[in-house]
Image (cartoon, grey):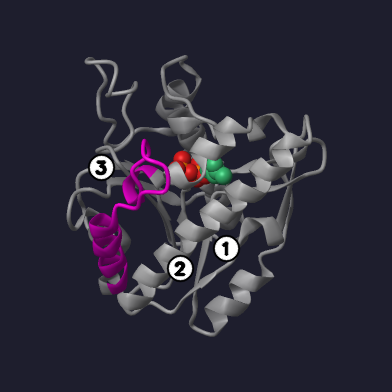
Amino acid sequence: MMILVKLGGSVITDKNKQNTVRRRVLNRLSKEIEEAEKRVIIVHGAGSFGHISAEHYALNKGYVDGEQKKGFALTHQSVRLLNNIVLESLIKAGIPAISLPPLSFLRLKNKKLSYFDGSWFKDALKLGLTPVTFGDVVIDRKMGFSICSGDLLMVALSAEFKPERAVFVIDEEGVYSANPKLEKTAKLLKNPSLDELKQVATSSNSYADVTGGMMGKVDSISNIAAMGIDVWVVNGNKRDRTYRALIGKKTKGTIVKGVKT
Ligand code: IPE
């Protein structure tokens, strides 16, 4: 059995400053993952290494003009730069991390998964290596290219590997009923049912970015829980919560029980 963990781009980077890593947080999270001594597949977001250039070149619209080719290349190069820093941090913490870029193992069609080859993950796990993948620009069979978020990777990997648990490490306390940064009445949902989650995903609130922001994330979480897999959402800025989520010990955050539907 294995655990899937996503390190959100807003936790490991400063989302407002292009190409800025939050190194202290990243290194602590690497250590927490190592200390949990679990088999993991790690997914990380792009944060300011992806979102700024992806927005600048409107990459989520797909291929519309030639200018975007530079944007596609730059965005891919930039997320790989972050990926290398993540690998470095994980390896220093004692994790034999290796990189698997989505551009080389999956395709989308109208932003939805259309082809996914998990065999490299399997091979790596068999050897005791820790696969690391990340939000990336990818080929899209309808749009030319589009953006594959780390959250979509979590769904694809959950379907393929049926992990013991999926852990989302974000920069908030968990999933709220609305965007807590903008709405004072937003409540932390500690043990929401799938129905309650669906309400968050459909209510039009201020949760959005090029890959759907929190709404996209809630949708991914619901999809994973509907596969019968427990999903934990914890604040990566707070020490030990990621570690506890990995070992399955109660901690502050959102826990969604997996239900077989
Ligand atoms: C976005 O990945 C990928 C690109 C913008 C190229 P994510 O959606 O997983 O990144 P975060 O976690 O929101 O930063």
Dot label at residue 62: none
- Residue at position x 61%, y 74% from top? 122
- For the residue carrying disc 1, how many other residues have a C-alpha within 10 Å: few (<14), some (14-19), or many (20+)? some
Residue at numbered disc 3: 253
Residue at numbered disc 2: 2
- Residue at position x 82%, y 36% from top? 142
Secondary structure beneath label 3: loop
Q: In this rendering, is residue 196 above or below 168?
A: above
Precedes in sequence: disc 2 or disc 1: 2
Precedes in sequence: disc 3 or disc 2: 2
| Residue 13 is one of the magenta-drawn residues | yes
Residue at numbered disc 1: 161
Q: In this rendering, is residue 56 above or below 250?
A: above
- The answer, for residue 66, to whether it is visible in the render is yes
Q: Amino acid at mark 1?
A: Phe
Side of 133 where 176 appears, left or right: left
Precedes in sequence: disc 3 or disc 1: 1
Residues in magenta, as a range: 10-34
Secondary structure beneath label 1: helix
- Residue at position x 45%, y 21% from top? 199
Q: Give coordinates of residue 44: x percent, y percent.
A: 45, 54
Q: Amino acid at mark 2?
A: Met
Is the residue under label 1 in contact with that under label 2 (CB below 8 Å)? yes
Which residue ends up furthest to the bottom in the rendered image? 127
For the residues labelled 2 and 1, the Cα–Cα distance comes to 8 Å
| Residue 248 is one of the magenta-drawn residues | no
Q: Give coordinates of residue 39: x percent, y percent.
A: 42, 73
Is disc 1's CB within 8 Å of ligand 1? no
Q: Give coordinates of residue 32: x percent, y percent.
A: 26, 66
- Image quarter where the C terminus lies is top right
Q: Give coordinates of residue 232: x percent, y percent.
A: 35, 48
For the residues labelled 3 and 1, the Cα–Cα distance comes to 24 Å
